[in-house]
Amino acid sequence: MPAGTVLFSSRAPIGYIAIADGKVTTNQGFKSVVPNSNVGTAFVYFFLKNALPTIENMASGSTFKEISGSTMRTVPAIIPDDKNLQKFANFCEPLFQQQRILEAENRCLASLRDTLLPHLMSGELDISVIDI
């Protein structure tokens, strides 16, 4: 699946939603929605979040609930005209970009923490002399 694909967990549990930041491969536990160019990733993402109660009610299964691909295709959707879709995408894209930046920063900080913490705990690094 290409970057921008909206990934929707379709079982155990239903409704985890993510956006692929690069090419990905999924398994049968996901419904991967590749938005067409005029609808866009942001609209699909928020549509699925909003439609989650409807989707959960359409799910079936005895051990755990699951939504099939054929059932997902029957989820009712109202798609705005291209002008409003573009306005929505223009509004959402800077927010999604900021989220990608913050997630990358969090990964970097977590890596730094994981590198430094053992050295701090062992006493190998002493930060008591640092003036903050």
Image (cartoon, grey):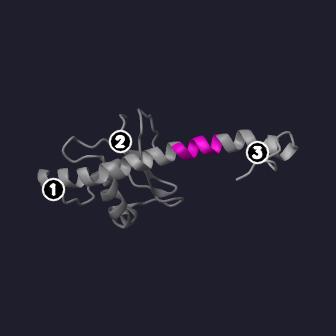
Residue at which label 1 appears: 84
Q: Which mark is residue 117?
A: 3
> Residue at the spot x=82%, y=50% of the render?
128
Q: Are marks 2 and 1 in contact (CB under 8 Å)?
A: no
* Quadrant of the drawing holding the N terminus: top left
User: Looking at the image, which is closer to me, 113 or 16?
Assistant: 113
The residues tagged by marks 1 and 3 sit, at their Cα atoms, a distance apart of: 49 Å
Residue type, mark 1 in image: Asn
User: Mark 2 or mark 1, which is nearer to you?
Assistant: 1
State whether residue 56 is above or below residue 113. Answer: below
Q: Earlier in the sequence, mark 1 or mark 3?
A: 1
The amino acid at mark 3 is Leu
Q: Where in the figure is residue 14, as x and y percent of width and height?
A: 46, 57
Q: Which residues are magenta?
A: 105-111
Q: Main secondary structure of the magenta part?
A: helix
| Mark earlier in primary sequence (2, 1) | 2
Looking at the picture, tell me which residue is in the foreground, 119 or 99. 119
